[in-house]
Amino acid sequence: MGFLDRVQAAMEKNNSLLCVGLDPSPERFPASIQAMEKPIFEFNKAIIDATADLVCSYKPQAAYYHACGAEDQLAMTIDYIRTQYPDIPVILDSKRGDIGSTASQYAIEAFERYQADAVTVNPYMGIDTIEPFSSYADKGTVVLCRTSNPGAAAIQNLLVQQDSSVENGNTAMLYEVIARMCKEQWNGNNNILLVVGATNPTELKRIREITGDMTFLVPGLGAQGGDVEATVKNGLNSEGKGIIVNSSRGIIYASGGDDFAEAARNAAVKLRDQVNLYR
Ligand SMILES: O=c1ccn([C@@H]2O[C@H](COP(=O)(O)O)[C@@H](O)[C@H]2O)c(=O)[nH]1
């Protein structure tokens, strides 16, 4: 089964569009977890066990593991999800992008070394840097389109000429061009998804218009302040599907105490139910 079918099955099984982000900062763990031999894995394991019936996917952000030399605990975390909760796909958020030969190595890292089900990629260098990922037909390739961060508009909302043979007119914003390319040119294996931030409901609506039924990974709720109602109403496709809604810090740090897993569960229930209210 391909990534999109797997994530859809998890959405239906758990009645949830929620993707919990596993962005572990050990200094925010309770002392009891910090004292353990593999604190990041133990923290993640507790969060996963507390939320696995509430989510459609998990999204570990690679930087949090690389920054402290904890690649082994990233591998352990993904392996734990794969073995204990095989119905829940894993999106590795590493935002890779490089020339084709190097991108191939990044694809091997994501899909063969870590056994992730999908990976985030940066489209700035073009289709030859995306293909090494999307050629894994049963895996998901999640392309940055309109990101959630404050500085995104200065680049992604730039007006550009869509057709280099046309001198005037035929302009669109860069994120619209990326969305259209993903839809019309890059999606031959039907396994491309787009990252669209919840902090930009207008752009979310526009990208939905351009891309029809494609699936979006939507970060930016919770800690970044995105609005749940606007995200769901502007993001869903005509079949009432097509968004994977991510929250990381808002769930995993709902409490900094020993009750962190229980608090994460409560926060996940709350966000899942808020999202479902507007479906
Ligand atoms: O546009 C983007 C793309 C990726 N992210 C990532 O999602 C999570 C969001 O974390 P929160 O704690 O819920 O804010 C994080 O891993 C980012 O690297 C994003 O925020 N925006």
Image (cartoon, helix red, strand yellow):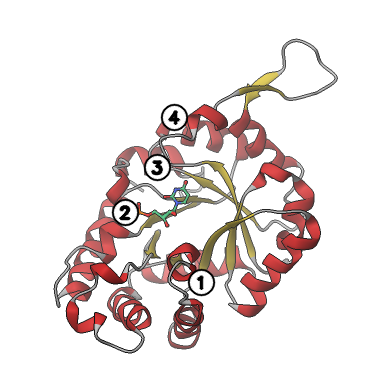
Q: Is residue 76 left or right of residue 44?
A: right
Whether residue 82 appears in this view of the structure is yes
Residue 276's place in the image compared with 59, above or below, is above
Which is more N-terminal, label 1 or label 2? 1
- Quarter residue 172 falls in: top right
- Relative placement, left or right, of 222 versus 241 is left
* Residue at image coords 48%, 88%: 83
Question: Few, some or many C-alpha atoms within 10 Å of disc 1 (few <14, some 14-19, many ≥20)?
Answer: many
Residue 160 image position (x, y, % from top left): 67, 23
Tell me the distance, in whole angstroms, between the alpha carbons under discs 2 and 1.
20 Å
The residue that disc 2 covers is 276
Instruction: Please give the residue where the numbered disc 3 appears in the rendered image.
Output: 198
Q: Amino acid at mark 3?
A: Ala
Q: Earlier in the sequence, mark 4 or mark 2?
A: 4
- The mark closer to the camera, 4 or 2, is 4
Q: Which element type, helix, strand or loop, lies under badge 1?
A: loop
Q: Secondary structure at mark 4?
A: helix
146 relative position to 43: left or right: right
Which three-letter amino acid code belongs to the residue tagged 1? Pro
Q: For the point 75% across and 10% down, which residue is it?
A: 168
Query: Which residue corresponds to mark 1?
Result: 89
| Disc with the residue nearer the chain's start (1 vs 3) | 1
Instruction: Tell me the tag on residue 202.
Output: 4
Label 4–label 3 contact, CB within 8 A: no
Circle 2: is it few (<14), some (14-19), or many (20+) Cα within 10 Å? some
Disc 2 residue type (three-letter): Asn
Residues at marks 4 and 2, CA–CA distance in whole angstroms: 21 Å
Dot 3 crowding, Cα within 10 Å, few <14, some 14–19, many 20+: many
Q: Are circles 4 and 2 on residues that touch, CB within 8 Å?
A: no
